Amino acid sequence: MACERFEDALKQMATDAARSAEAPRLGAPRVEPELEAHLAGCARCREELDALRRTLALVDSELHQLVAVEPSPDLAARIRRATADVEEQATGRPVWLWPALAAAAVLLLAFVVLTRRQVSHPAVATVESPVPLATQTPQLPGPTTPERAPTPVLAAAATARAVPREQAPAAQPHRSIPPAEPEVLVPPGEQAALLRLAALVTRQGAVPPVLSSVNQASPDLALPRAIDAESIEIKPLEIVPLDPAETNGTTAEGEGR
Amino acid sequence: MARGVWLSRSEVLLDDAMSAGWAEAVSLDPALEREFEERIADSSMLAFRVAVSVLRHREDAEDVAQDAFLRARRAFSGIRDRDRFRAWLVRTSFRLALDRLRGERRRTRRQDAVALEAPARSESAEADAVRGELRAHVTAAVSELPEKLRIVTVLAAIEEHDLASVARLLELPEGTVKSRLHRARTLLAERLRWLVSDSKTR
């Protein structure tokens, strides 16, 4: 009976003291006088204590060997190469990517339709760039535009890779998209945000955490800078009818320019 | 003044987002770049050790460490402080390793590669077998611990029971770490007590 009373104290003692010889920082064993007196006269408890200590010594030994496994000598170099070569990482596009992008494309198309509607309505002042656009983006040669339509430019967020395509459309096989496809007007802040959103979709594989944490600092996703709540219009996307006639009309308007 | 940014086609936008977004998300200014390099130098081993303690497989653990750093680079501006970075890295490596292990388990029953590479200092094949079995029991018991206790146990081994270091890595008070470690060790002692009950393993 006396032994049962000391069961927990025994475990405590074994746990605290198991490494005390090797690692005093864990804390010196706290031997209660009562337990000490019991141990002096109880061989069974001394054996139990010894068994618990040996168990934990075994655990420590195995864990020590496990974490002592050495990586390849070039691990740091490998990581350095991988982090420096992000383009390479981006080529490993996962299986879910295309469905996710298709969904993003639908959202984008809806956004485009809405945006153009707003732009074509004189009473609606579309989004004003908080900073003169010329300071953010390179001006590229483009077709003559009506007075309210901006010159075609790419935002600074688009890579240099994209710029030559804009400059020399005919030379790029990728540009052989039928002219019937509408152009996309994205207000400056939203353009950057959409680029980032699409990038996050490719990276994270899921949009919801992004949208739901729009206003929250989220170091894991690098969001605070990435998405500005004010620059993403989510609500209109829900009410935009994807009317083919309207889309065609929009296209015609775009072509007329 | 232009009111918007024209992109020629949605297809272009998405295509560019694929590369521009990636590139932009990870481009660091030179000062940050240097700091990140330092983090790779002083913390890649930490990421590897956390991963290998879960995966028990060297190559897999290296993959996880690399993945963790790729993510760290994207988030680096928010985790620039060294302690914060290492804490983030521990969490991320641990999580990635667990995810990878679960994925592996779905596909196949993995060999315990590290066990296969155990030091060849045993006297006989029988001793090797006994040792391998012991290791399997110990690692199984550790992996069955609740995650909070498991990470403390692993980090205590990595940091050689320097609880102040473990506390920094987990961003927890040292007292909390100590109490979790005690709970973890008590559970391990109870579960593995039978290993030393009859035979003399030492």
Image (cartoon, rainbow, N blue to C red):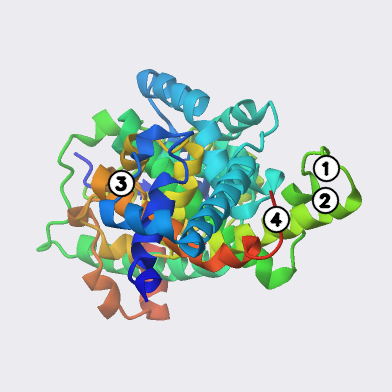
- Would you name the residue on which mark 1 appears? B122
- Residue at the image point whose x is 75% and y is 53% from the top: B131
Query: Residues under labels 4 and 1: Cα distance?
Result: 16 Å
Q: Is residue A97 above or below residue A20?
A: below
Chain bearing mark 3: A
- Label 1 sits on a secondary structure element that is loop
Q: Residue A199 at what x, y percent from top left? A: 45, 51
- Residue at the image point whose x is 52% and y is 40% from the top: B47
Query: Residues under labels 2 and 3: Cα distance?
Result: 37 Å
Mark 1 Cα shell of 10 Å, populated few (<14), some (14-19), many (≥20): few
- Would you name the residue on which mark 3 appears? A30
Tell me the mark number nearer the camera, choosing from 4 and 1: 4
Tell me whether circle 2 and circle 1 mark residues in contact (CB < 8 Å): yes
Does residue B48 appear in this view?
Answer: yes
Q: Are marks 2 and 1 on the same chain?
A: yes
Q: Earlier in the sequence, mark 2 or mark 1?
A: 1
